[in-house]
Amino acid sequence: MIFHNDPVETFSRFWLAYPRHTHRKDALIAWCRLDPDEALITTIIEALAWQRQQPQWTTSDGRFIPHAATYIRGERWNDEKTTTATSTPTVTRFASLGMHHRKI
């Protein structure tokens, strides 16, 4: 016998972790359509942990945090993890890629 997670309960876990609490009903509908298993829920919560720290989400009073339904429908937990931009010189970046400057 297979037991599915209660979508309202699992959504509540997501909602607590998500920083922008607007349009809850739309987000719940998107969540129910997604019907995530426990592994996916864990992946989403872990992604939110680093995404919440990104400049796009922490500046301008969270203005650029997507609505939760948009986040869910867009599977934004799959976005590439970004790091703070560093001022690595271009030559160093190319050298680390095995590329060297040549005169033409």
Image (cartoon, rainbow, N blue to C red):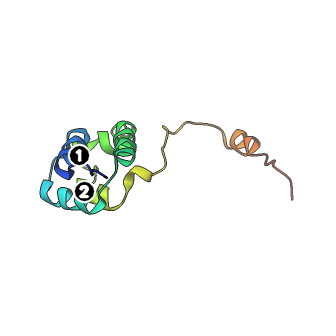
Choose between 51 and 57: the one closer to the eye: 51
| Picture layout, residue 92 above or below residue 22 | above
Residue 101's label in the rendered image is none
Disc 1 residue crowd, few under 14, some 14–19, many 20+, Cα 10 Å: some
Choose between 101 and 21: the one closer to the eye: 21
Which residue lies under the disc numbered 1? Answer: 10
Q: Position of residue 19 (x, y in %)?
A: 23, 42
| Drawn side of residue 53 relative to residue 16, left or right | right
Q: Are marks 2 and 1 in contact (CB under 8 Å)?
A: yes
Instruction: Tell me if residue 67 can be seen.
Output: no
Q: Position of residue 20 (x, y in %)?
A: 20, 46
Q: Nearer the viewer, mark 2 or mark 1?
A: 1
Q: Position of residue 24 (x, y in %)?
A: 14, 53
Disc 2 residue crowd, few under 14, some 14–19, many 20+, Cα 10 Å: many
Q: Position of residue 60 (x, y in %)?
A: 25, 43
Q: Label 2 is placed on what type of residue?
A: Trp
Q: Label 1 is placed on what type of residue?
A: Thr
| Drawn side of residue 79 relative to residue 22, left or right | right
Which residue lies under the disc numbered 2? Answer: 31
